[in-house]
Image: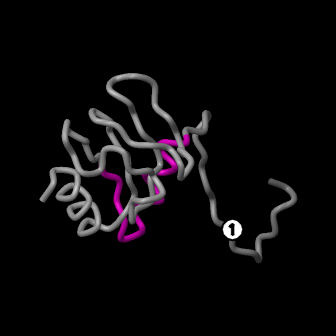
Amino acid sequence: AAALSPDERYRLVTLPVNTRADQEFASLLRSVDETLGVVQLPEGSPLVGTTVGDLDSTVVAVRSGGSAVDALPDGERVLAAADSVYVVGRPDVLRALETRARGG
């Protein structure tokens, strides 16, 4: 405190004791137009057999039928029935992807 100047203005920033990536990610999403959504791929979905790179969205993770999450999957990852695809995008983009997943 002795090194601080009485003539300068300072901003006090508090940080959590433990950094949590999920909290930081959520706080970043609050300041932009995009949001995080989960698109389920039912059996017979037209998206089954396509790749992550074929989607017009930013895919941040894929969970295959209740198994472990594949975080930041590469664009060549093939999607399968019962996959949950975690996507960041504008709400209209997420709705369009959900519609495609259902075959609509």
Q: Residue 5, percent across and down? A: 81, 69
Say if 90 sits above or below 66 in the image.
Answer: below
Where is residue 91? Give x, y as percent: 26, 65
The residue that mark 1 highlights is 10
Residue range highlighted in magenta: 21-37
Q: Amino acid at mark 1?
A: Tyr
- Kindly identify the residue that appears in the image at 52 percent across and 49 percent down: 24
Locate residue 83 relative to residue 32 in the image: left or right. Answer: left
**Image point (45%, 25%), residue name:** 68
Nearer to me, 12 or 102? 102
Instruction: Identify the residue at the far top of this view.
Output: 67
Confirm whether the magenta stretch covers residue 80: no
- Which is nearer the eye, 10 or 45? 45
The image shows residue 10, relative to residue 73, as above or below, that is: below
Classify residue 4 by image quadrant.
Answer: bottom right
Counting from the top left corner in percent of width and height, residue 39 is at 27, 47
Considering depth in this image, is 28 or 60 the residue closer to the camera? Answer: 60
- Residue 26 vs residue 48, the one in the foreground: 48
Q: Could you say which quadrant of the image residue 84 lies in?
A: top left
State the residue at coordinates (32%, 26%): 65
Asked which secondary structure carries label 1, the reply is: loop
Residue 66 shown left or right of residue 6 in the figure: left
Report x, y in % for residue 67. Answer: 40, 22
Dot 1: few (<14), some (14–19), or many (≥20) neighbours within 10 Å? Answer: few
